Amino acid sequence: MSRARDFIEDLLTPAVDAGVADDIRVCVSELATNAVRYGPRGRDFLVRVTTRDGTVRVEVHDAGDGAPRVCAPTCDDTRGRGLLVVAALADDWGVSGRDGVGKMVWAEFKARAAAKTPC
């Protein structure tokens, strides 16, 4: 997942506000982890990032069947919080089918420009 996080960091820094970029990086990490954990073994996943009208949209495409579901983990559970984290940090998120096999889980963030550092 570090490659996905690094990809997002390199792409968004320094253009997007650091707090928003951190939220996006965390969400991509959670979605990529889910793609690896619940997708078919040995299959790759794709991270796509687009910007439009002040919104950053991240998509994680994988070949896994079925839609992810938000769980209600207990305090002792060590898994099951990823989509809760995405729902809390993203302005919107959802799941879409893909042509052929698999799904795309997406999250959108209102992007604030990074603050300019005075000289």
Image: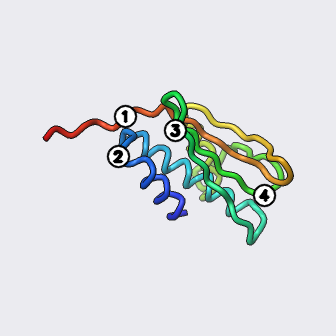
Q: Regarding mark 2 in the picture, which secondary structure is present there?
A: loop
Instruction: Give the class, few, some or many, for how many residues have Cα within 10 Å of label 2's Cα (few <14, many ≥20).
Output: some
Q: Which label number is shown at residue 89?
A: 3
| Amino acid of disc 4 | Ala
Q: Cα distance, mark 4 to mark 3?
A: 25 Å
- Placement of the N terminus among the 4 image quadrants: bottom right
x, y (%) of residue 92? 60, 32
Q: Nearer the viewer, residue 50 or 65?
A: 50
Q: Nearer the viewer, residue 86 or 113?
A: 113
x, y (%) of residue 28? 56, 51
Instruction: Give the class, few, some or many, for how many residues have Cα within 10 Å of label 3's Cα (few <14, many ≥20).
Output: some
Q: Cα distance, mark 3 to mark 1?
A: 17 Å
Q: Cα distance, mark 2 to mark 3?
A: 20 Å
| Amino acid of disc 3 | Leu
| Amino acid of disc 1 | Ala
Q: Are marks 4 and 2 in contact (CB under 8 Å)?
A: no
